[in-house]
Amino acid sequence: MPRGTDLGGWNTGFVAQLAAPGTQKVTLVRGGRTEQVLIDGGGGSWGALRQDEADRRLVRRGGPEPLRDVIEEHVTRWRVDGAPPPERFTITVSPKGRHTT
């Protein structure tokens, strides 16, 4: 998946949320252009994606973790695996943590 890929769509959002469970996505419209902002309130990281006037995708980020990179890595792996629907996922939560297959 190219850097700065749009994370829209319910299934893609589901996979993104699994990659970074404490992250919230906010969509802003500024100057007639849509900007997707990802915020990890607990960790202090953020990432933003917008298109400029030349239709290029621009990514900005800050904080201790490369939030968009982590999410894009998971979304890429999901797409390479055929983008299975959420019904194909198994999420197990135990005292040892969360595991997703």
Image: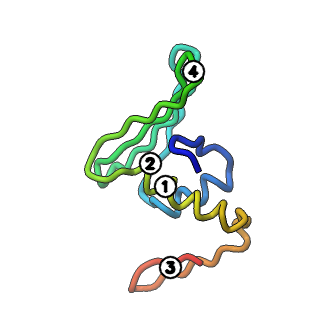
Along the polypeptide, which appears first: circle 4 or circle 3? 4
Left or right: 85 as drawn, with respect to 67: right
Specify the amino acid type for callout 4.
Arg
The residue that appears at 58% across and 58% down in the rendered structure is 76
Q: Disc 4 to disc 3, how far (Cα)?
A: 37 Å
Along the polypeptide, which appears first: circle 3 or circle 1? 1
Specify the amino acid type for callout 1.
Ile
Along the polypeptide, which appears first: circle 2 or circle 3? 2
- Circle 1 sits on which residue? 71
Q: Disc 2 to disc 3, how far (Cα)?
A: 21 Å
The residue that appears at 41% across and 41% down in the rendered structure is 47
Along the polypeptide, which appears first: circle 4 or circle 2? 4
Q: State the image coordinates of residue 32 (x, y, percent, origin top left).
A: 58, 15
Specify the amino acid type for callout 2.
Arg
- Circle 2 sits on which residue? 68
Q: How is the image coloured?
A: rainbow
Specify the amino acid type for callout 3.
His
Q: Is residue 86 above or below residue 27?
A: below
